[in-house]
Amino acid sequence: MVRVALGLLADYANVSREGKLNILGIFEQISAQSVPAVHPQMQLVMALEADRVDADREQKIGLELIDADGAKLLSISGDLKFGPPPHGGKIRINHMIQLNNLQFNRFGDYEFKIIINNEVRYSIPLSVVELNQS
């Protein structure tokens, strides 16, 4: 079974030549003076793990952004195939999705849902709050 070992939002992330996951600016909140607010760039970072039996099997992966009322604001999906494990153990894939110019029409709570094979496996919260203008 495919699992989400890590899921978060960050300003930037990459994977080094050595396979290290580098993450800068982890956040769960965006401040804005007014709405609609546009966030220029963020990366959704996830680490997916699978067992040996999942190697070479196609998996359906999806991402949805949901607002506090349950309305779907963004939906991305695709297929992913895990290669064989390097040493016969678990398979791990570090994956980043760059999201540009996301618009938030109101202040409040949002949620990114990571969906694997049509089942929500992980949720990442995000709050859009009014910037205190003191």
Image (cartoon, rainbow, N blue to C red):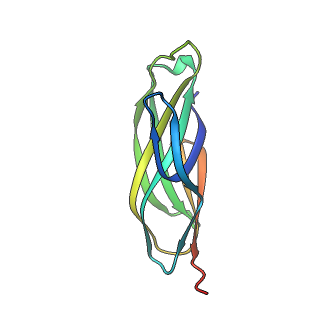
Determine whether, in the image, residue 123 is placed left or right of residue 102: right
Vertical order, 93 against 72 (above or below): above
Q: Quadrant of residue 129?
A: bottom right
Task: Name the quarter where the C terminus is drawn.
Answer: bottom right
> Foreground: 119 or 82?
82
Name the residue: 41% across, 44% down: 77
> Foreground: 104 or 33?
33
Q: Residue furthest bottom?
A: 134
The percent position of residue 117, horizontal first and vertical second, equals 50, 36
The percent position of residue 79, horizontal first and vertical second, equals 40, 34
Q: Residue furthest top?
A: 88
Name the residue: 42% across, 29% down: 17
The percent position of residue 29, horizontal first and vertical second, equals 59, 64
Vertical order, 101 against 96 (above or below): below
Total of numbered circles in the picture? 0
Name the residue: 47% across, 27% down: 18
Vertical order, 31 against 74 (above or below): below
Can you see residue 95?
yes
Vertical order, 76 against 4 (above or below): below
Task: Name the quarter where the N terminus is drawn.
Answer: top right
Can you see residue 118?
no
